[in-house]
Amino acid sequence: MRYSLRTKLTISYIVVILICVAIISIAANTVFENQFRQYVIDQQEKQAAETVTMIEQRYQAVDTWDVFYLENIGMNALENGMILKVTDAENHLVWDAMVHNDGLCHQMLTNMQENMQGYFSEWEGGYEEKQYAIYDRSAQVGTVSVGYYGPFYYTDRDLYFINTINNLLVWAGIVSLVAALIFGIVMSRQLSKPISRVIESAQRIAKGLFGEKVHEKSKTTEIRQLVDTVNDLGETLQRQQEASRQASLDIAHELRTPLTTMRGNLEAVMDGVMSLDEERVAVLYDEVLRLNRLVDDLGQLSRFERENLILNKVSFDVSDLTRRIVHNMQNDADVQGKRIVFSGKAETIYADIDKISQVLLNLISNALKFTHPGDLIEIAIQGDLQSTKILVKDNGIGIAEEDLPHIFERFYRADKSRNRRTGGVGVGLTIVESIVTAHNGTITVNSIENEGAEFSISLPKEKRNE
Ligand code: ADP
């Protein structure tokens, strides 16, 4: 069964309160009840002892039984649940509450019995007596017998106290439950409302409305993070969508230019306006090369996206590989009037040699593309115990600050019109980044516009799995 966040939270609040109320009730009914019972027993014993002391002191004061005084004390004791009977040394009755007011005594005992049986469902008790000797100058002058409903009894006042506590607990429970319910509803509303709004926005994003933004100012950290993440997701998807749209336009344009040139040339040849001489063939060949490059780039990207993570790792000297690639590109650089320099000691890495070559090729050809004649391109390999660094630095046109975060995105080109001339479609760095990531490495770029760009790759030293 699936429940909403609101129902779950409210239920958990109520369950917690119910558990608390149950624990408090059990604790009250055992600990409190025991303590109170002990208190009542102590109190009753104390009262009996005090009553007897008072009788003894009176006897010692007047040297005989003061029946009027005994009557006073006896009636008072009766109100507190004690039936007094005083006998002298010869066991003659001096005063007896039963004799004095038999009806009241029986009424008191019945009342106690009702109290106890009403409170304890399985109560078993009865009339009990305790004897206390009365002394005057070390001689026993009589005995006071204190009769009561035993083994202990609750007076109306005691029961009132117990019931008040119990009622208080019940009310505390009811108030807590209502409070939990209200809190549960308010809290879950506060949580579920923004989440529902985020869900609605995410659903609109899922339908393709990437510009959709969640405007939710929650005070809950996780919800804020969720809102930011969904907004970021929307923005990324929007950028991707724009990049793909732009890419389709760019690709169409890139294809159209060589195709138009070739078509124009071929039509002119077919119409006999131009002859198919060596120069014409060279122009056509250049356009074919251009098309080839474009199709290669696109093919490479789609292949990469399919088999991105399949790496064919071997151990090789990356400095040696770089030196060879630099050597191969030297000619291009010379033609363009640019200088390429390499520095680095032998550095063995365990990686996919073809894919690392691809990385170097893409970075160096970018450096060649985005520099002016006379500019310098520096390539370096550095290594320490933890990692190997590949640095490609140029002092060319650089990358604008606003473009920096996006240059690794597919089809992203910093300056569309300028790049058209350079012939790229904005996938070179996407490929570089995915190769580096597949090798658990990182790539960073530092650049200042018009001052140059520096790409730095860090590959962790990996043990050969052999
Ligand atoms: P492209 O096929 O356009 O070269 P890349 O993915 O290789 O695509 O590069 C993306 C963009 O990053 C380029 O269009 C360019 O604007 C910028 N860029 C890459 N390398 C450099 C560099 N060395 N100097 C200046 N800009 C660069």
Image (cartoon, rainbow, N blue to C red):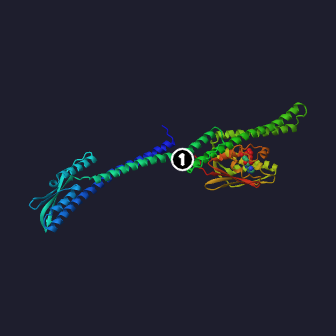
Q: Residues within 10 Å of mark 1 (few under 14, many from 20)?
A: some
Residue at image coords 85%, 35% = 264
Q: Is residue 90 left or right of residue 184?
A: left
Residue 286 percent coordinates (x, y): 82, 40
Say whether residue 326 is visible.
Answer: no
Residue 289, picture quadrant: top right
Give whichever of 183, 118 is nearer the camera. Answer: 118
Secondary structure found at label 1: helix
- In the displayed orientation, state which residue is furthest to the front: 68
* Left or right: 189, with 59 as reference point: right
Q: Amino acid at mark 1?
A: Gln
Pointer 1 residue = 190
Residue 12 percent across, percent down from the top left: 46, 45
Q: Position of residue 393 (x, y in %)?
A: 73, 54
Where on the picture, by quarter, is residue 428? top right
Residue at mark 1: C-beta within 8 A of ligand 1: no
Residue situated furthest left in the rendering: 90
Can you see residue 1?
yes
Say which of 20 and 456 sits in front: 20
Question: Camera-side residue: 316 or 223?
Answer: 223
